[in-house]
Image (cartoon, rainbow, N blue to C red):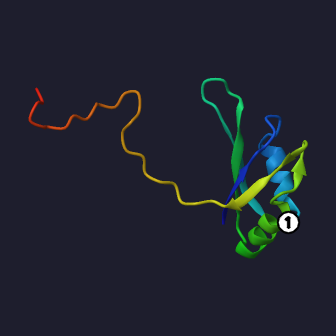
Amino acid sequence: MNIYVSNLSFDVNDDDLRGFFEDFGTVTSAKVIMDKFTNRSKGFGFVEMSDDEAAKKAIASLNGGMVDNRPLRVSEARPKEERTGGGFNSKPSYSKGNNSRW
């Protein structure tokens, strides 16, 4: 099961995140998401656990728990949504109305 963890202290690293969940079962991966420009934590991450029951227990136990004076928000991760356009390098979209030059 993939788990979403937010409201992390900016000092929490991948190993810390893994440690929060290891008491509940086998952690297959733990990743704090970093800003690609500043290389600083974005304050959230993802944990993958192989056993769904252990993951559910971890979510129930850790959600709302305090780490570095911050209450963690822990939930099952939603599937990643496909992004469409809107980025810096994307082409603008123009409607072809009556007054359009395009």
Instruction: Locate residue 97, reporting x and y percent.
Output: 13, 37
Where is 38 relative to 51, above or below? above
**Residue 97, can we see it?**
yes
68 left or right of 77 in image? right
Q: Residues within 10 Å of mark 1 (few under 14, many from 20)?
A: few
Which residue: 28% across, 31% down?
92
Q: Quadrant of residue 13?
A: top right
Residue toward you, 90 or 23: 90
Left/right placement of residue 60 relative to residue 96 reads right
Q: Amino acid at mark 1?
A: Ser
Residue 25 visible, this angle:
no
Image quadrant where one finds the N terminus: bottom right
| Local secondary structure at mark 1 | helix
List x then y, in percent, for residue 86.
Answer: 38, 36
Please say if 27 is above or below 92: below
Residue 89 sits in quarter: top left
Question: Which part of the image, by quadrant, shows the C terminus?
Answer: top left
Q: Is 25 placed left or right of 34 in the picture? A: right
* Image location of residue 9, percent across then percent down: 81, 39
| Residue drawn where x is 90% and y is 42% of the image | 68
Residue that carries the numbered disc 1 in the rendered image? 61
Task: Work out whether residue 34 or residue 71 is closer to the camera in this orientation and state it.
Answer: 71
